[in-house]
Structures are given as C-alpha cells and as structure tokens.
Image: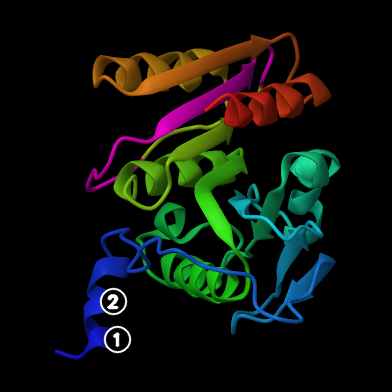
C-alpha cells in the first residue's frame, strides 16, 4: 500500500494525514484575502495577515449550502489584530461528507489545504471552527484530530460524529437559546455536558438569539483563543 492509499484509508475514518511541523513564511507568499483552487468544485477562501511572525491557522467550515468567502467573514474582522490565518474550504456537496453518508472527500480537501498553507506560511497553532453543520463537522474533526488541532470553535452545532478520538483539544461552543434550526436543548445542551464528562476543557456561551453568530460571540471566541 502506497502513501496515497494509506491517506485515503485514514480519510474515510475522519483522520487527517497532515501533522503539524515547524514552518516558515516562503518568500513572496501572498497576503490579504483571496481564493485558491484545491481541486474541488469550488475554491477555498483565505485571509493571510501581513506579518513576518507565526500565525494561528483557523480552518473555518460553512453551514449547509454555505460559501467559503462568506464563511471567511465570520472572523475576518479579528484576523489581522489577532494574527489569524483564515482558511475556509468548500464541501464537496451541499454540506460536509460525513453528514451525507461518510468521511472522505472533504477530509482530503482539508488535508491538502493544511499542507499547502503551512508550506507557504509560518504557523503556530491550529484551530478548526464552524457554524451550524460546519460547527458539527468542526467538533467531529477536532475530536478525531486533536493531535492536529489544539482548539475547536463550534458556533451553534448540532452533533459530533467522531469515530476515533485523538489528542486533547480545547473547545469553545456557543448557541442561541431561541435557535429553531438546531434547538439548543437537543444540541449544545447535550453535546457540552458529554464533552465535559470526558474531561475535555470546554468553554460554553449561550446567548439570547436564534441560529446565528452574534458579534459578541465572535469576539468571545477570538479572545478565548488568545488566552491560551
């Protein structure tokens, strides 16, 4: 079995083959907001702060039917100040692979993005984040790949579907008390205690609102990242 076959076997289990390694910014590496083609049906959206020092890489995952450029805006207002390298991939279908039947193509896309990005930029610390279906996928990938991602941000998640668990990531979860899309009682109010019972470090914020990510929750998540 070759390396590519082995990676494919890992992808169908929700495991990334990428592993964090020390990296440096390549000469001429692009900064600002732009999109990149990673072989899928839609490009990924990036934002790279203009900084010579290491950046925290944040993989941002869209909700069902979402778009990478719009998803990048979740934390864009905080990216330059907090040195966040934002990477927003597109799902291969209307939503993420595991929700449509099983891990595979989207794990592979994220693997490719992580490798390409860390080949170009100095990265120190990796976070996976998302909203709605993207939050559920972030929880799932974070639990399965806690040896890659040291932190997970989940805005209004519905579930976690990790088949395997590796590492010890930290979690930030927020949810609106009036959410009618993913009701808080059967979602975060079940997910968060389950994570806490497994001894994960979880910061949980509820807010008066629906299926959304208020400005204060975005700010709270970024500040939470900066405290660790």
Question: Which image quadrant: the N terminus?
Answer: bottom left
Measured as percent of width and height from the top left, residue 37 is found at 68, 81
Q: Is residue 108 magenta?
A: no
Measured as percent of width and height from the top left, residue 46 is found at 73, 63
Q: Residues within 10 Å of mark 1 (few under 14, many from 20)?
A: few
Measured as percent of width and height from the top left, residue 214 is found at 79, 24
Q: Quadrant of residue 68?
A: bottom right
Q: Is residue 170 magenta?
A: yes
SS at badge 1: helix
Residue 158, relative to residue 143: is it above or below?
above
Q: Which residues are magenta?
A: 161-179
Q: Left or right: where does residue 82 sit relative to residue 58? A: right
Q: Left or right: where does residue 132 sit relative to residue 36? A: left
**C-alpha span from label 1 to label 2:** 5 Å
SS at badge 2: helix
Q: List the single residue furthest toward the left.
A: 1
Q: Are marks 1 and 2 in contact (CB under 8 Å)?
A: yes
Residue placed under numbered mark 1 in the picture: 4
Residue placed under numbered mark 2 in the picture: 7
Marker disc for residue 185: none
Foreground residue among 57 and 121 = 121
State the predominant SS element of the stretch in magenta: loop
- Residue at x 25%, y 68% (from the top left corner): 10
Q: List the single residue furthest toward the bottom.
A: 2
């Amino acid at each position: 079995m070759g390396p590519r076959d082995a990676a494919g076997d890992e992808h169908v289990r929700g495991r990334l083959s990428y592993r964090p390694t020390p990296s440096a910014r390549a000469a001429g590496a692009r900064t600002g907001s732009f999109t990149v083609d990673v072989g899928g049906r839609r490009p990924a959206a990036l934002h790279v702060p203009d900084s010579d020092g290491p950046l925290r890489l944040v993989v941002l995952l869209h909700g069902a039917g979402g778009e990478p450029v719009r998803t990048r805006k979740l934390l864009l207002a905080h990216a330059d100040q907090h040195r966040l390298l934002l990477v927003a991939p597109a799902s291969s279908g209307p939503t993420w692979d595991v929700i449509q039947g099983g891990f595979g193509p989207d794990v592979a896309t994220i693997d490719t993005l992580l490798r390409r990005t860390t080949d170009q930029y100095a990265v120190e610390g990796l976070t996976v984040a998302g909203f709605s279906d993207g939050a559920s996928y972030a929880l799932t990938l974070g639990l399965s790949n806690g040896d890659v991602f040291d932190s997970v941000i989940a805005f209004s998640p519905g579930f976690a579907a990790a088949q395997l668990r590796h590492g010890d990531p930290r979690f930030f979860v927020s949810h609106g008390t009036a959410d009618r899309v993913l009701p808080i009682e059967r979602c975060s109010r079940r997910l968060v205690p389950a994570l806490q019972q497994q001894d994960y470090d979880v910061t949980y914020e509820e807010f008066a609102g629906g299926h959304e990510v208020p400005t204060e929750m975005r700010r709270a998540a970024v500040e939470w990242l900066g405290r660790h």
